[in-house]
Image: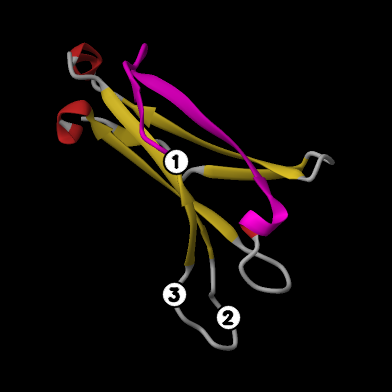
Amino acid sequence: MSGYKDTPTLGIVNTGTGFYEIQVSYTIFYAPNELLFPEGWFDSVALFESDKGEVLGGGDDRLFDLEPRFFFPQSTEETRTFSILRTRDQLGTESGGEEIYAVVHHVRGIQHV
C-alpha cells in the first residue's frame, strides 16, 4: 500500500522579479502492484498561512490550491515536486512575517472519476 516517506518539504525563494517561487516536494512509496493500476494516480497541493499565535486568532488562511495532476508512477519510490510562482501580495494575509505550510493530496485515480 502506498505511503509517505516524510512530511512534505517547502522552500520559498525570492526570484527578484516580484515573484516568489514556492517548491513543495514529497516522497511516496508504492507497492509493486500499485505501479500497474490502470487508472493511475492524482496529486495536488494546497498552501496555507498559519494564524498560530496571532492576537485575534482564528483559523489558518488558505492561500490557494493547485489543480490535481494525473500521473503513472515509474518506480516504487518517487519524489514529486510542485513549483509555484506567486507575488508577495498573494502570499501575505497579515502584516509581519508569514508562516506558510503545505498540504499534499495524493489519491488513486478511481477516487476522481
Residue 82 part of the magenta segment: yes
Residue wearing tag 3: 59
C-alpha span from label 1 to label 3: 20 Å
Q: SS at mark 2?
A: loop
Question: As drawn, is 59 to the left or to the right of 56?
Answer: left
The quarter of the picture where residue 107 lies is top left
The amino acid type of the residue labelled 2 equals: Gly
> Is 21 placed above or below 53 here?
above
* Residue 42, image x, y percentages: 31, 30
C-alpha span from label 2 to label 1: 27 Å
Residue wearing tag 2: 53
Q: SS at mark 1?
A: loop
* Residue 39, image x, y percentages: 18, 19
Residue wearing tag 1: 66
Which one is closest to the eye, mark 3 or mark 2? 3
The quarter of the picture where residue 9 lies is top right
Disc 1 to disc 3: CB gap under 8 Å: no
Which one is closest to the eye, mark 2 or mark 1? 1
Residue at position x 71%, y 55% in the image: 88
Question: As drawn, is 73 to the left or to the right of 57?
Answer: left
The amino acid type of the residue labelled 1 equals: Leu
Residues in magenta?
66-90
